[in-house]
Amino acid sequence: MDIELTIVVSGRIVILLACGLLLLKSWLNCNKRFLSDFPFVYALVFFSLVVGKAIDLYIQVNFGPEDYSAAFLATTRVRYVVMAVTMTVLIGSVLIIWFRSKTRANLGILAGNAAIWALVVVFAPDYQSLSMSLTYLVSPVILILTFTFVFTYRQKRLMNKFNSLVVAIGCVITAAAHLMRPLLIRVGTGGWGLSWICEIIDLIAWTFIFWGFFKPPVHVQKVHEELSTVTA
């Protein structure tokens, strides 16, 4: 068991859960609530990340990256199912921004994405195949997320909903963590190498994303405070 990785992943579970609960609380405090509201959508993302990290912790404690047992492959498949949920919700958040009114088309895109993940999870013969497919399934989502939030920042769109720049920075950092993970696993001592460094980087990324949805830009906060003062 890699002590550093165990500590970091355990800490991630606690922090991600807290982020999800805070986003859910902010959504519940709204006068009008919709399931497409970003605090609710990203609360779901953080809760799915918690489940995924709990499975990662189980895998890290009980297996190694070079394990070829049926139990390891089965657990990895379950992990990919959770990851599929996370990616589907993230795609849904992008569709809300670009095509909010096109419900049927959005549902079709989400169903297609889920179907692709299902095919990979069911038919990938081994861990190596699953791991290789991760790049093709996750990288496009991260790129689309980054482009979307950079675009909304430059166009000054939805500024009262989230801080686009902060979220975009988080997306860039998580992309870097994703690219570094295979290399860090092979470096250092222990079965999982220095992958705990990648976990810290990824946690920083998701902290940025959380903050971007939890707090609007500063000038928007000032407007809300002024309105609150007037109504008081």
Image (tube, rainbow, N blue to C red):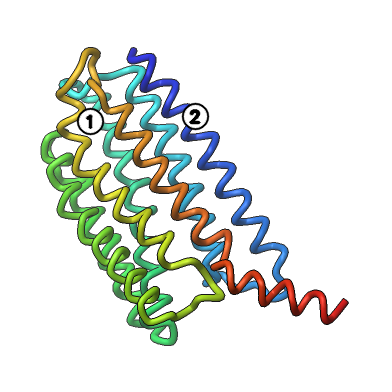
Residue, far right:
232
Labels 1, 2: front one: 2
Residue highlighted by disc 2: 11
Who's the residue at 56% across and 63% down the image?
39
Q: Are marks 1 and 2 in contact (CB under 8 Å)?
A: no
Q: Quadrant of residue 125?
A: top left
Q: What amino acid is found at the position of numbered circle 1 in the picture?
A: Leu
Residue, far bottom:
101
Q: Quadrant of residue 203?
A: top left
> Vertically, is 209 above or below 49?
below
Q: What amino acid is found at the position of numbered circle 2 in the picture?
A: Gly
> Vertically, is 39 above or below 8?
below
Q: In the displayed structure, does residue 81 sit left or right of residue 206?
A: left
Q: In the displayed structure, does residue 74 sit left or right of residue 52?
A: left
Q: Secondary structure at mark 2?
A: helix
Label 1: few (<14), some or many (≥20) within 10 Å?
some
Label 2: few (<14), some or many (≥20) within 10 Å?
some
Who's the residue at 56% across and 75% down the image?
160
Residue highlighted by disc 1: 73
Who's the residue at 59% across and 56% down the image?
23
Percent x, y for residue 232? 88, 76
Who's the residue at 27% across and 58% down the image?
142
